Image: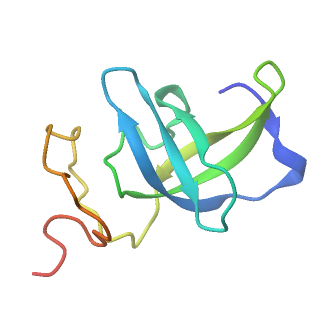
C-alpha cells in the first residue's frame, strides 16, 4: 500500500460508506469525522476482497504523496463490529434506502 503514516497517526475506525467490488475500491467515513478516506482492495490486511456498505472497519491513515490525499492502509473488519464474517461481496441490490442500518443483516439472533 502506498504512502506513509499521516503525521504519526494511530489506527482508526470508521464505516464503509461505499464499496465498488467491480473496481476494487471504496470509501470509509472515519468515526472521528473529517473527509472520507479512499481505500483500495490491495490495502486490505485481513484477506478480504472487499467490504459491504455499513461495515465497521479499522484502518491506518496514510498520506499518498502522488495523489496529495490521505488513504486507508492495513484495513480490516473491526472486532466486535457485529458484522457477518462470511460476507463475500455485496450481492447486489439489498441496500436501497437503508439509512441508519446499524448491525446489518443477521444482527440479533
Residue 61's place in the image compared with 98, above or below, is: above
Q: Quadrant of the N terminus?
A: top right
Q: Residue at point 75% right, 40% down? A: 62
Can you name the residue that lies furthest to the front here?
97
Q: Nearer the viewer, residue 100 or 47?
A: 100
Position of residue 30 in the picture relative to residue 7 (left or right): left
Q: Quadrant of the C terminus?
A: bottom left
Q: Residue at point 37% right, 57% down? A: 55
Quarter of the image for residue 66 reads: top right
Image coordinates for residue 35, horizontal then vertical, percent: 67, 51
Q: In this orientation, does residue 83 appear?
A: yes
Colouring used for the render: rainbow
Q: In this orientation, does residue 48 appear?
A: no
Can you name the residue that lies furthest to the right here?
7
Position of residue 40 in the picture relative to residue 35 (left or right): left
Image coordinates for residue 81, horizontal then vertical, percent: 38, 69
Image coordinates for residue 101, horizontal then vertical, percent: 27, 68
Image coordinates for residue 85, horizontal then vertical, percent: 25, 56
Position of residue 102 in the picture relative to residue 61 (left or right): left
Q: Residue at point 68% right, 58% down? A: 11
**Number of numbered markers:** 0
Q: Nearer the viewer, residue 72 or 30?
A: 30
Q: Nearer the viewer, residue 34 or 66?
A: 34
Residue 39's place in the image compared with 6, above or below, is: above
Can you name the residue that lies furthest to the bottom here?
109
Amino acid at each position: 500500500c502506498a504512502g506513509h503514516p499521516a503525521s504519526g497517526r494511530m489506527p482508526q475506525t470508521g464505516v464503509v460508506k461505499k464499496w465498488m467490488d467491480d473496481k476494487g475500491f471504496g470509501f470509509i467515513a472515519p468515526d472521528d469525522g473529517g473527509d472520507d478516506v479512499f481505500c483500495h482492495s490491495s490495502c486490505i490486511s485481513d484477506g478480504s476482497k472487499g467490504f459491504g456498505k455499513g461495515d465497521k472497519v479499522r484502518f491506518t491513515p496514510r498520506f499518498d504523496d502522488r495523489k496529495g490525499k490521505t488513504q486507508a492502509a492495513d484495513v480490516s473488519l473491526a472486532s466486535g463490529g457485529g458484522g457477518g464474517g462470511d460476507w463475500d461481496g455485496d450481492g447486489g441490490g439489498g441496500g436501497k434506502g437503508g439509512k441508519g442500518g446499524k448491525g446489518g443483516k443477521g444482527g440479533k439472533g
